[in-house]
């Protein structure tokens, strides 16, 4: 057991929901302020370009695919002149289900419901990130981790009718449940995460690795007072965790008539796949054939190097094993997929444990020094997010 795991185990007597919410209040208020700044910048920038900020958030790109699933169900596809087939089976169902529920019980449209779900889910994600960081480190680090997640350059996606916020909320709380020994809760939330995005595999892996490690420690310790009920709950959590992703993938295979690998064919129609990063490497290399595109290539290399460095620091700080497994898989799946390269930054949004080393460093600063840094980065992120979302391509 690592030092951080020992501290985690010692904190299982956490305060109840009211006390937990009070402890998280500074983080949630700071998060809400940053997101409000981002939305204001988006509204002003979009108005200057004669565009609708709300349309950009709720009715463009993937948002349209989700609302179409919510309204009409699965089965819609677009055949492109080059032979590619874009099927809505590529989009996992939990967000469309929630959009349909919201439209059914309120006067909201499907797009409106998706926006509300994302707003609420982003707050739940911020709270979950705080809970994990506070549990592993302390309250100040938890607040800093949430603020860093909020001020990411692509943080505007957290407010879009996309599935990133919903997935991050489910992943964060599943990891928190793992760290606090709530195995059934962890498995249930992992299953829901698996119904949200393909990267739900990373949450399932974190649950399984943590559970296997717990069984291994029991064997090493050779305990005589093992709690049979706790072991049963651990096994149940492991069984629940993969059900969401596995269930949807198998259903897609049955619907397409192509068996268990049918979902991979659906993704191939979108030119999505896992090639170990070969396509991304070629994309970066192509930047160096001209100037100033070479500057973008340098920026991409520096960005990847920063991710690797952050992960190495996470290992050196001896983060709990489930966090390392989760963050590592999210990062690998994002960088090594052959999908649309402009989406890679948002695909990394759920990898919040990578921010913990930066949060630790920020927490060590005096507020008089850290506040201007956070405010400056928040303004820059708000401007960049408005510029990015008003671009020609999807985020």
Image (spheres, rainbow, N blue to C red):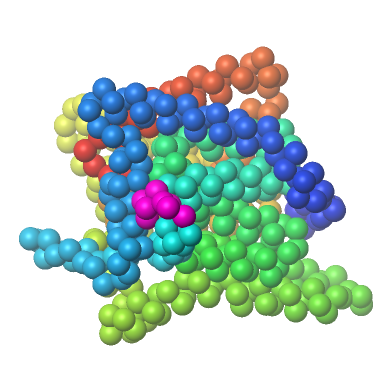
On screen, 29 above or below 204? above
Does residue 386 show up? yes
Does residue 347 show up? no
- Work out which residue is located at the far left of the displayed protein and give it: 81
Q: Is residue 175 magenta?
A: no
Quadrant hosting residue 352: top right
On screen, 21 above or below 267? above
Count the numbered circles shown: 0
Percent coordinates x, y for residue 186 in the rendering: 65, 64
Tell whether 367 sits left or right of 3: left
Percent coordinates x, y for residue 295 in the rendering: 28, 28
Tell whether 51 sits left or right of 122: left
Q: Quadrant of the N terminus?
A: bottom right
Percent coordinates x, y for residue 126 in the rendering: 59, 43
For the point 42% across and 52% down, which residue is it? Answer: 107
On screen, 330 above or below 302? below
- Work out which residue is located at the far front of the displayed protein and give it: 107
For the point 33% across and 34% down, which residue is it? Answer: 53
On screen, 311 above or below 65? above
Q: Nearer the viewer, residue 256 or 117?
A: 117
For the point 34% across and 24% down, which residue is it? Answer: 44
Range shown magenta: 106-114
- Work out which residue is located at the far right of the displayed protein and give it: 224
Tell whether 369 sits left or right of 66: right
Percent coordinates x, y for residue 58 in the rendering: 35, 46
For the point 40% across and 80% down, which residue is it? Answer: 250
Q: Quadrant of the C terminus?
A: top left
- Work out which residue is located at the far top of the displayed protein and give it: 368
Q: Nearer the viewer, residue 178 or 157?
A: 157
């Amino acid at each position: 057991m690592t030092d951080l795991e020992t501290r985690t185990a010692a904190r299982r007597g956490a305060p109840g929901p009211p006390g937990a919410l009070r402890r998280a209040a500074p983080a949630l208020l700071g998060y809400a302020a940053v997101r409000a700044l981002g939305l204001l910048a988006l509204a002003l920038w979009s108005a200057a370009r004669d565009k609708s900020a709300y349309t950009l958030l709720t009715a463009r790109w993937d948002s349209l695919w989700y609302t179409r699933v919510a309204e009409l169900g699965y089965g819609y596809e677009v055949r492109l002149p080059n032979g590619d087939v874009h099927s809505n089976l590529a989009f996992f169902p939990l967000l469309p289900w929630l959009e349909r529920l919201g439209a059914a019980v309120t006067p909201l449209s499907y797009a409106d419901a998706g926006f509300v779900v994302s707003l609420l889910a982003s707050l739940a994600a911020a709270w979950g990130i705080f809970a994990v960081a506070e549990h592993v480190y302390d309250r100040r680090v938890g607040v800093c981790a949430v603020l860093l997640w909020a001020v990411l350059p692509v943080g505007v996606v957290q407010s879009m009718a996309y599935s990133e916020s919903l997935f991050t909320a489910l992943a964060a709380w599943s990891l928190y449940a793992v760290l606090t020994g709530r195995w059934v809760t962890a498995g249930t939330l992992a299953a829901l995460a698996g119904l949200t995005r393909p990267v739900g595999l990373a949450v399932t892996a974190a649950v399984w690795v943590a559970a296997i490690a717990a069984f291994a420690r029991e064997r090493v310790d050779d305990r005589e007072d093992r709690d049979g009920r706790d072991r049963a709950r651990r096994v149940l959590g492991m069984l629940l965790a993969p059900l969401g992703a596995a269930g949807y993938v198998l259903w897609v295979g049955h619907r397409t008539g192509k068996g268990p690998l049918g979902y991979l064919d659906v993704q191939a129609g979108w030119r999505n796949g896992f090639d170990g990063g070969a396509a991304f490497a070629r994309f970066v290399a192509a930047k160096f054939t001209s100037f100033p595109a070479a500057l973008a290539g340098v920026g991409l290399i520096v960005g990847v190097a920063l991710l690797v460095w952050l992960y190495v620091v996470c290992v050196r700080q001896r983060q709990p094993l489930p966090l390392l497994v989760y963050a590592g898989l999210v990062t690998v799946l994002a960088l090594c997929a052959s999908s649309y390269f402009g989406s890679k930054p948002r695909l990394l949004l759920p990898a919040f444990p990578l921010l913990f080393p930066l949060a630790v460093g920020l927490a060590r600063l005096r507020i008089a020094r850290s506040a201007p840094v956070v405010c400056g980065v928040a303004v820059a992120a708000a401007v960049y997010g408005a510029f990015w979302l008003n671009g020609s391509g999807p985020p």
